[in-house]
Image: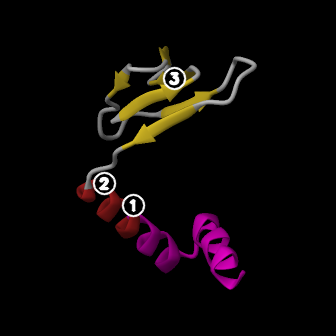
Amino acid sequence: MLYGIEGVLTWTVNGTPIEVGPGQALCIPRGAVHRFDNLGNEDVKQLAVISPAIIGQCGKQARLNKARGTSAARKSQSREAI
């Protein structure tokens, strides 16, 4: 879930743009393709709440990528070296 604090971010969820400003919230369904853009001229602050199940899935995917030797795993390994 995302909660707008300052400014406006435009989130695109499964191809649909959605503006989230102060006091507004957005829930992104599991598995939805999403991104955000700051199309305005001011800084933006938003609070993101991520459930533990999703965090666990990201870790599981990272381990699978590492085992498969995919590029995502190589990027992750290079970040760990820093």
Amino acid at dot 3: Thr
Quadrant occupied by the C terminus: bottom right
Point out the residue furthest to the right here: 41
Stretch of the chain drawn in magenta: 61-82
Give the numbered dot on residue 54.
2
- Report if residue 23 lies within the magenta region: no
Give the total number of marks visible in the rendering: 3
Question: Does the CB distance between marks 2 and 1 fall below 8 Å?
Answer: yes
Whichever of labels 3 and 2 marks the residue nearer the N terminus, that label is 3
Quarter-wise, where is residue 2 in the image?
A: top left
Which type of secondary structure does the marked residue at label 2 adopt?
Answer: helix
Please provide percent x and percent y for residue 77.
Answer: 63, 78
- Report if residue 73 lies within the magenta region: yes
Which type of secondary structure does the marked residue at label 3 adopt?
Answer: strand
**Image point (70%, 17%), residue name:** 40
Residue labelled with disc 1 = 58
Q: Is residue 27 left or right of residue 62?
A: left
Q: Is residue 75 left or right of residue 14?
A: right
Give the numbered dot on residue 12.
3
Please provide percent x and percent y for residue 38.
Answer: 66, 25
**Image point (46%, 68%), residue name:** 62
Give the numbered dot on residue 49.
none
Please provide percent x and percent y for residue 32.
Answer: 38, 34
Q: Is residue 67 left or right of residue 74?
A: left
**Image point (70%, 77%), residue name:** 78
Local crowd size for mark 2, using a 10 Å CA cut-off: few (<14), some (14–19), many (≥20): few
Q: Is residue 78 above or below residue 45?
A: below
